[in-house]
Amino acid sequence: MDSPSSAPSSSPSSHDDWALVNDDAEIVASVTTDSHTTSPNESTHEEEGADTTLLGDEVPEGYLSVRLRQGEEIKPAWFKATQQVDDFIAKFFAEEIAHGKKIRLIYMGMLLLPTRSMGEYGIEENGVIHSVITDAPPVPHPHAAHQTNLKTLSPQNTLLILTGVFLYGLWTLFYYFPHFFTWKSIILLSVFSVMHMSAAVSCLTS
C-alpha cells in the first residue's frame, strides 16, 4: 500500500535532474555555436591578409604590372611601354647595381636589350620576366691599359709602319714612272718588300 504514495515523491527529483541536463546541453550547444560562427570570420580575415600580401605595392596608373622572377623568388614590378629597359633595371635592381652586379632580363626566351623600350617586346600584363644577376666583368687597370698602348706603339712596330709607307711610295713611283728604275733597283725593291712582309707577319703572330 506504500508503493503508490512513494511514486509521486520521486517525481520532483527526476524533474530537477532533467532540468540540469537540459541546462548543460544548452551551454554546450551555445559554446559550439559560437565557435562555428567565429571561424568564418577568422578565415575571412586570413583571406584578406593573403590578398594584401599578394597585391603588395599598388601599380601606378598608366603602368603595366609584371612579375620579376629571380630563382624561386617572385616580386611585383611595373613599367610603361615607352620606358627603356635600362631605366627599368635601374628602378627595380638599384641594390644589385650598387654592388657592381650585371643584370639581364629575359622574357619568353628573348633577351631584353638595355637600349630598347619595354613595349617593343610585347610583354603581357602579369607576365613573368626572368632576371639573371651575375658579377660584372672586371675593369682593366689604367696602368695595364697604358702598357698595352705602349706595346702597340713599340719602336719595332713604328719602324715597320714607316718602312711600309716608304716601300709603298717606291712601288707607286715605279708604277707611274718605270723608266726611272733599272733592273737592279727593281730587284732590290722586290727583296726589301719581301723582307718587310715577312717581318710584319712575324710581328703579328708573335
Image (cartoon, rainbow, N blue to C red):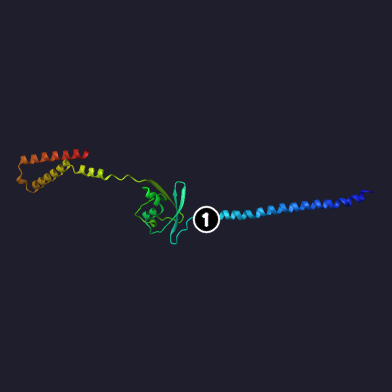
Q: Is residue 153 left or right of residue 25?
A: left
Question: Which of the pair 197/85 is nearer the observer?
Answer: 85
Look at the image and tell me in which quarter the C terminus lies: top left
User: Callout 1, which amino acid?
Assistant: Thr
The residue under label 1 is 52
How many neighbours does mark 1 have within 10 angstroms: few (below 14), some (14-19), or many (20 or more)?
few
Residue 68, placed above or below residue 154: below
Residue 91: x and y in percent read 40, 55
Residue 38, placed above or below residue 158: below
Q: Residue at x 51, y 53 (%)?
A: 53
Question: Which of the pair 38/200 is nearer the observer?
Answer: 38
* Count of numbered badges drawn on the protein: 1
Residue, far bottom:
61
Residue 158: x and y in percent read 16, 43
Residue 76: x and y in percent read 46, 54
Q: Is residue 74 left or right of residue 34?
A: left
Residue, far right:
1
Q: Residue at x 54, y 54 (%)?
A: 49
Residue 143: x and y in percent read 25, 44
Q: Residue at x 90, y 49 (%)?
A: 6
Which type of secondary structure does the marked residue at label 1 adopt?
A: helix
Q: Residue at x 22, y 44 (%)?
A: 149
Q: Is residue 86 left or right of residue 141?
A: right
Question: Which of the pair 30/71 is nearer the observer?
Answer: 30
